[in-house]
Image (spheres, rainbow, N blue to C red):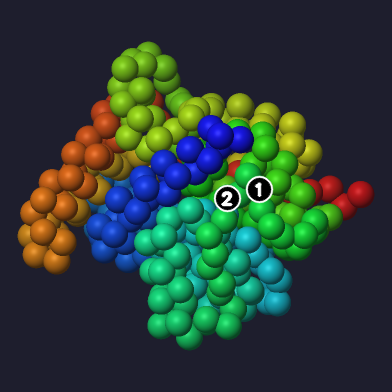
Amino acid sequence: MGNEVIDTAVIGRHYDERSPIGDELRDGQIHMWYWYDDDDDAPLTEAVHRVSRKVTDTLGLRAGEHVLDAGCGPGATAVYLAQAYGVRVTGVTVSAFEIDKARARAAAGGVAGLVGVEYGDYAALSYADGAFDAVLALESLQNAADLGQVLRELYRVLRPGGRLTFSDFSLESDSEPARVAKFMDSLKLHRLPTMAEWLGHLRDAGFQIEEYTQCGPRVFGRKSKYLKSAMGRRDEVAEKFGEDAVAQFSQRHLGFFAPRKEQIGYVIVSARKPRT
């Protein structure tokens, strides 16, 4: 239990440090981007929102359903779900910055009555069994100290027949482990599963796999497009946050860009809790 508490605190600080500038660059969505090819001229915020749509579309949401956004970030995805689908969303995060930002974003978006954001460790949720119709985990399972425990907990709070969709990084090549190790350290990852290993973890927790895709080449594989977009806004961001903050943000992300683009994949997986 002691290690879990330490890990949770470390992850909270990790996002408190990175989310403010990440929120600014990606308009409240601190997850990855999606560009079709190098000629795709979509701005970064649109490329990031493509991932939001691509991942959440697989949940098959219906108006009035209750969604758990496990690791909700600064709240843009939760607001999008409430506005687009008319669902209730409960977001949990261990970042104080993200809680404040997400609540403000829900109020500004006119969906404060549908979106609630709380401090919560997804390895030990306070919600009753079967409390949710669907669970979304956008790049949050990667930080689980005990992935099996987290998946069992998400399974518990889903109703029978409820759905889970997550997106996360995957290991595609371990030919240069030093590069991958830098990537994992920069994101505070405990593990970097292959696609097959991700599916195995879900099955071990009791889920039935329904859909999965590997879109790494259009996500991590387009990291140069992200860098170009971020650098184009460097002066603007530095004016708002200060040169020291921008320098620290850049330093913290150096390891993220260390792997070759073919080494890191990006998986989207949808699964269901059996009805019986």
Q: Which mark is residue 109?
A: none
Q: Residue furthest top?
A: 175
CB under 8 Å between discs 2 and 1:
yes
At a point 16% along the width and 52% down the height, the residue shown is 245
The answer to which quarter of the image holds residue 263 is: top left
- Mark 2 lies on residue: 121
- Secondary structure beneath label 2: loop
| Viewer-proximal residue among 91 and 203 | 91
Query: How far is the residue under mark 2 from the one under mark 1?
Result: 6 Å
Name the residue rendered at 57%, 56% in the picture: 120
Determine whether the residue tagged by mark 1 lies in a helix, strand or loop: loop
What residue is disc 1 on?
A: 124
Q: Position of residue 50 (x, y in %)?
A: 42, 59
Closest to the observer: 222 or 82?
82
Q: Name the amino acid type tagged 1.
A: Ala
Q: In this rendering, is residue 26 above or below 216? A: below
Query: What x and y, as percent, mark residue 241?
Result: 16, 61
Give the quadrant of residue 41.
bottom left
Residue 150 lies, with reference to residue 73, above or below; the image says above
Residue toward you, 257 or 251? 251
Residue 53 left/right relative to 90? left
Q: Is residue 32 visible to us here?
A: no
